Amino acid sequence: MHSFVFWMSASFVVAVVFASFFEWALHRYFMHRPVGKFDYAFRAHAIVHHQTFKADHTYHLIHDKDKETIPMAWWNGPVLIAVGITPFLLATWLLGSWGVVCGALLAFVSYYGAYEYIHWCMHLPKKRDIERSGIYFRLNGHHLLHHRYMHKNFNVVLPLADLCLGTLLLRSKVHFKQAEGPAVPNVQPRVRKPSLPKFATVD
């Protein structure tokens, strides 16, 4: 029993980290470019979602009919979770403990659920409790910048992969008319304060 709990806990932590890189790779290589003849994810995300939700006031839902373009299709979750835990099935066989795959499954279900809920709140704000948190505030700015720079800030839930793989952007490179709201941070370039002139001193 202790062994099961240990491997489940360890696998959960590893799987959360892995999920950040999995999300990053999926977002960058499948959702922003067609892969051979497979262009479903590209069309659904880069073409439909990004054309509907930009970084200006349209970052938030304008037309109710576009609400269905915020989440992924219902079947995407089970498929992505199954693909994500595949390496942990191999680890389960090698280590001989079902705790490994159970921890990974819990991590991926939680990560995907967090992705869908946070992403929904970002584009359809309702002054929910989560929208008042500092972590959400920063993640919202992170995602807003992705809608301005589609090849930056691929993570929605945990920007660890963005940080490690060089796609993390904290502020915009140029001024633009961004979305506004109580849970949306200012992501404009920092304004440099003019330096005071230096005067020569006489000893």
Image (cartoon, rainbow, N blue to C red):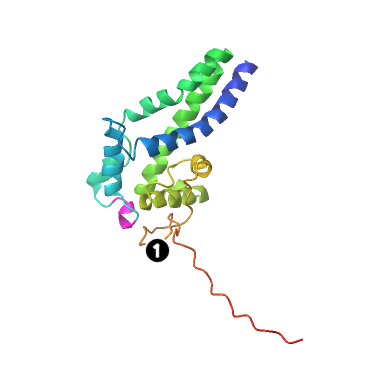
Toward which corner of the image does residue 13 lie, by quadrant? top right
Q: Is residue 59 above or below residue 191?
A: above
Q: Residue at x 52, y 44 (%)?
A: 163
Q: How many marks?
A: 1
User: Can you see residue 66?
Assistant: yes
Query: Which sits in the foreground, 145 or 131?
Result: 145
Estimate the x, y position of residue 131 in percent, counting from the top left: 44, 49
Estimate the x, y position of residue 45 in percent, counting from the top left: 31, 40
Estimate the x, y position of residue 92 in percent, counting from the top left: 53, 16
* Residue labelled with disc 1: 175
Toward which corner of the image does residue 174 lie, by quadrant? bottom left
Question: In screen coordinates, is 96 left or right of 182?
Answer: right
Estimate the x, y position of residue 161 in percent, counting from the top left: 50, 39
Q: Is residue 170 above or below residue 192?
A: above
Category of crowding for the residue at label 1, using alpha-carbon neighbours closer than 10 angstroms: few (below 14), some (14–19), many (at least 20):
few
Q: Residue at x 45, y 50 (%)?
A: 142
User: Can you see residue 113?
Assistant: no
Residue furthest right in the image: 203
Q: Which residues are magenta?
A: 56-61
Label 1 secondary element: loop
